[in-house]
């Protein structure tokens, strides 16, 4: 993803991608490994309900072009797709700490993800795994397209402050 990253930058980027993927992907991987019988007992876990799908689509149509409204549409649904709004809010709340390249990255990457979510959601299967994979791939595409590595290189301290290390490890 990045060319010639420093060790600190590599660590920060790896941890932030881990945090993002864990927040967005949710607990499906843990659920399938812990008790496969429970997975079959709850068919809603495997597919987005028709009601949730309609609610998300309605929300996407009505969400504004600025802010985190599009990302909020994916909170509280039967596929447990969470974290997009929190990622957006974290970027927006910390945008003032970034240099001009970092601010451009935030604006462009969030706009790219919001646009992609609007357009790709209606075309995707209602299977939770397919939706989560689409979200993860879209994040990756937008981060690469809008040069996360360059923005991170000059804003390592800000990105490190944004990562909540306590969220990366299970409590116990």
Image: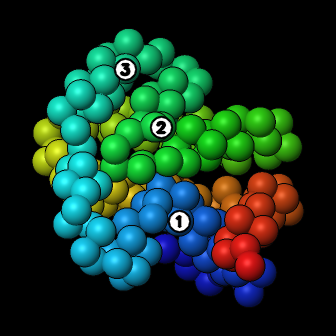
Numbered label attached to residue 22: 1
Give left or right: position of 15 versus 70.
Answer: right
Closer-to-camera residue (6/60): 60
Q: Which residue is mark 2?
A: 75
Q: How many marks?
A: 3
In the picture shown, does residue 154 fall above or below 168?
above
Real-space Cα separation, disc 2 to disc 3, in angstroms: 11 Å
Real-space Cα separation, disc 1 to disc 2, in angstroms: 15 Å
Residue 33 coordinates in the image, percent (x, y): 36, 82
Q: Give the structural element (helix, strand or loop) at label 1.
A: helix
Mark nearest the camera among 2 and 3 is 2
The residue lying at 71 percent from left, 65 percent from top is 167
The residue lying at 17 percent from left, 45 percent from top is 126
The residue lying at 34 percent from left, 38 percent from top is 117
Q: Give the structural element (helix, strand or loop) at label 3.
A: helix
Earlier in the chain: of badge 1 and badge 3, it is 1
Residue 131 coordinates in the image, percent (x, y): 27, 51
Residue 34 coordinates in the image, percent (x, y): 40, 80
Q: Give the structural element (helix, strand or loop) at label 2.
A: loop
Q: Which image quadrant is residue 45 in?
A: bottom left
Q: Quadrant of the C terminus?
A: bottom right
In the picture shown, does residue 116 fall above or below 6?
above
Is disc 3 surrounded by few (<14), some (14 to 19) or many (20+) residues within 10 Å?
some
Residue 151 coordinates in the image, percent (x, y): 67, 56
In the picture shown, does residue 106 fall above or below 14?
above
Numbered label attached to residue 59: 3
């Amino acid at each position: 993803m990045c060319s010639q990253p420093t060790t600190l930058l590599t660590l920060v980027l790896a941890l932030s991608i881990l945090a993002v993927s864990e927040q967005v992907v949710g607990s499906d991987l843990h659920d399938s490994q812990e008790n496969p019988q429970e997975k079959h007992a709850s068919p809603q876990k495997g597919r987005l309900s028709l009601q949730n799908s309609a609610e998300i689509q309605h929300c996407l149509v009505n969400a504004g072009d600025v802010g985190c409204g599009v990302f909020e549409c994916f909170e509280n649904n039967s596929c447990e797709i969470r974290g997009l709004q929190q990622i957006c809010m974290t970027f927006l709340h910390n945008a003032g700490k970034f240099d001009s390249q970092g601010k451009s990255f935030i604006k462009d990457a969030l706009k790219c993800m919001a646009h992609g979510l609007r357009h790709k959601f209606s075309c995707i299967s209602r299977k939770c795994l397919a939706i989560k994979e689409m979200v993860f791939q879209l994040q990756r595409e937008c981060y690469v397209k809008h040069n996360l590595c360059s923005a991170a290189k000059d804003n390592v301290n800000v990105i490190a402050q944004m990562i909540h290390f306590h969220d990366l490890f299970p409590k116990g």
